[in-house]
Image (cartoon, rainbow, N blue to C red):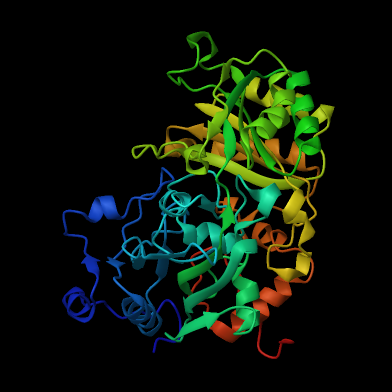
Amino acid sequence: MPSSASETIAISISQLRADLNGRVIAPDDTEYDEARRIFPGGIDRRPAVIVRPADVTDVAHVVTLARDSGQELAVRSGGHSIYAVSEGGIVLDLSDMKDLQIDVEGRTAWAESGLTAGEYTNAVGAHGLATGFGDTASVGIGGITLGGGVGYLVRKYGLTIDDLLAAEIVTADGELRHVDADNHPDLFWAIRGGGGNFGVVTRFKFGLHQVDQFVGGFLFLPATHEVIHSFMAEAEAAPEELSTIANVMTAPPMPFLPEEYHGKPIVMTILAYAGDAEAGERAIAPFRALATPIVDMVRPMTYPEIYPPDMEDYHPIAAARTMFVDVIDHDDVDTIIDRLHSSTAMMTAAQLRVLGGAMARVPDDATAFAHRGRKIMVNVAALYEKPEDRERFEAWIAEFARKINKGDTSGYVNFLNDEGGERIRAAYPGSTWDRLKAVKRRYDPTNLFRLNQNVPPASEGADM
């Protein structure tokens, strides 16, 4: 076996095809370019091979091959991660593994990792049930779950990982492990927020909630100081059934948005109430009263309808930062408005999510997501067209973030970009980092699973 990642053994495509039940896509195959494309724009990596496994046996074979050959291994679920494709290595693309077993009476579901949030949500939603994921249908359930999962049900039912009951994971030794509160509890703790550092999760067992009544949708408001500040106050005071997202942004040319607002600052809010229509309308009324809405698309709906439709050809190039804060004060609102007006980017946005509720009632040390008490998550982004402008917009967005976070560098690991080790470390505050490193050493001592927001294994002799 190679002693380091730099000592690699060539991969035989023909042998892979003979050994596996799933699909093997090589650089000379017609579907190669489409298969290597991921959601973020501006990334043009060319893997040596893309494997779409048919089953767990295929996954274990590829993990063993990557370990023994020294080839870099990228693991892909929905393709939204910047690390979902390797340059010159192996891509393990789980998108053909979509089995879903729903136990309606028991309120649980076993789901393979190739499912997207939209596919899972539509399937369980047919029974009036839901597990909370994020806010984009095309995200793979694997990535969002492993990082925590902040979505439309976060205040009512918590993070995605708060509904994770068990998982099956292929670790670096090529073995399949069933993990839950009683089996490999250290590994079960780590995969609830620690990302893809510990193996390839092939199946998740989720708890399901009855969400057969729902009110939600887009509410577009003018981007004034008073509207933004008051929105945050109303979101914090809202019942836990209501989760909100406020996107303070330059308006894209949406067909339902009056033309005079295109390219101008607006607040695109998403309101998500898990409950009956009458109570939902009462909870949402204060937001409608903030100003005369530009467009009001909030209505009673089924929970799966809250996900906007996928845009298959949308691959944005973005400079972005994520952070947790405990307040958005008047100065912060001024900063956001000023930044929107001063930007030369194609589109600029500040996303404000009030947290709390069920998410905050779980102790910090119960899972590897250790930001339970944080009140607000902020994501700022600048979308641009030319990859050569990256340095300029990265500097601009970093300064934007500094003005908002006031020296607090913590952030949500699922929204981190390629920002370096210090930012990854800050995503796991307190004792969480050292605990993750110890689990990493136990299950992946050579750091095979390193193409991610990487937690390195603890050094030899460290306290395990």
On screen, residue 411 above or below 97: above
Q: How many marks?
A: 0
Please report the residue visible at 59 percent of the width from the left and 66 percent of the height from the top.
164
Quarter residue 207 falls in:
bottom right
Q: Is residue 444 visible?
A: no
Which residue, as the protein is rendered here, is positioned at the far front?
105
- The x, y position of residue 322, in whole percent, is 65, 46
On screen, residue 169 above or below 149: below
- The x, y position of residue 400, in whole percent, is 69, 35
Please report the residue visible at 29 percent of the width from the left and 71 percent of the height from the top.
54
Please report the residue visible at 66 percent of the width from the left and 49 percent of the height from the top.
154
Q: Is residue 260 visible?
A: yes
Q: Is residue 54 left or right of residue 167?
A: left
| Closer-to-camera residue (392/123) | 123
| Closer-to-camera residue (376/105) | 105
Q: Is residue 228 left or right of residue 63?
A: right
- The x, y position of residue 232, in whole percent, is 76, 32
Which residue, as the protein is rendered here, is positioned at the far top?
260
On screen, residue 160 above or below 458: above
Q: Is residue 145 left or right of residue 369?
A: left
Indicate the quadrant containing the N terminus: top left, top right, bottom left or bottom right.
Answer: bottom left
| Closer-to-camera residue (315/456) | 315
On screen, residue 435 above or below 194: below
- The x, y position of residue 108, in whole percent, is 53, 65
